[in-house]
Amino acid sequence: MNAGRGGRRRSGGFSLLELLLVMVLIAATGVLAAGVLGGGFARMELRGNARDIVTQLRYARARALATGTPQTFAIDPAAHAWQGADGRSGEVPESLGIHFTGAREVQPADGVGAIVFFGDGASTGGRVQLSRGRAAFDIDVAWLTGEVTMHRAEARP
């Protein structure tokens, strides 16, 4: 068997580097396609922020159940900010619209909406709507059970 000049015989196939490069290109193409087909990156931002708020509302309910003490989730549409249980807080991008509907009696300040979760799992109930253009997500909190749900909606005028 003659190994050739270099002393090594090259077998057919691809190197690890070539395979990794192809995998990165496929992944990048997939992410871009998902953004285009899924309604664009703006819709992904809207959905992601809505899911963040759902998570914080569910966390506040879980803390109320675990500790037996009321927990409050407050959202300020003008400041695009929210505060949740255990000192958690966050912001909503300025590009998204926020509309809150809930019990006026538990509002911590003018223009700030709040939902209180009680130790038995019940709540004051309410709805947070995040929107961008005509697309929106409604985040509903049932007053009797405190259940938090999210669904697509049309933006409020």
Image (cartoon, rainbow, N blue to C red):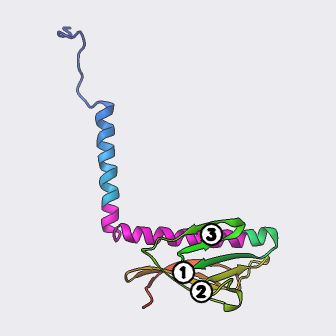
Relative to 1, 51 lies left or right: right
Q: Main secondary structure of the magenta part?
A: helix
Pointers 1 and 3 in contact (C-beta within 8 Å): no
Q: Which residue is mark 2?
A: 111
Tell me the amino acid under the disc marked 2.
Gly
Residue 122: % across, % down? 73, 82
* Disc 2 versus disc 3: nearer the observer: 2
The answer to whether the residues at label 2 and label 3 have Cβ atoms under 8 Å apart is no
Comparing 3 with 155, the one in front is: 155
Q: In the rendered view of the protein, which quadrant contains the C terminus? A: bottom left
Specify the quadrant that holds the N terminus.
top left
**Label 2 vs 3, first from the N-terminus:** 3
Tally of numbered tags: 3
- Do the residues bearing badges 1 and 2 touch, measured as CB atoms within 8 Å? yes
Q: Which residue extends farthest right?
A: 68
Image quadrant of residue 60?
A: bottom right
Instruction: Name the residue tied to disc 1.
Output: 77
| Residue 141 horizontal/vertical position (percent) | 63, 82
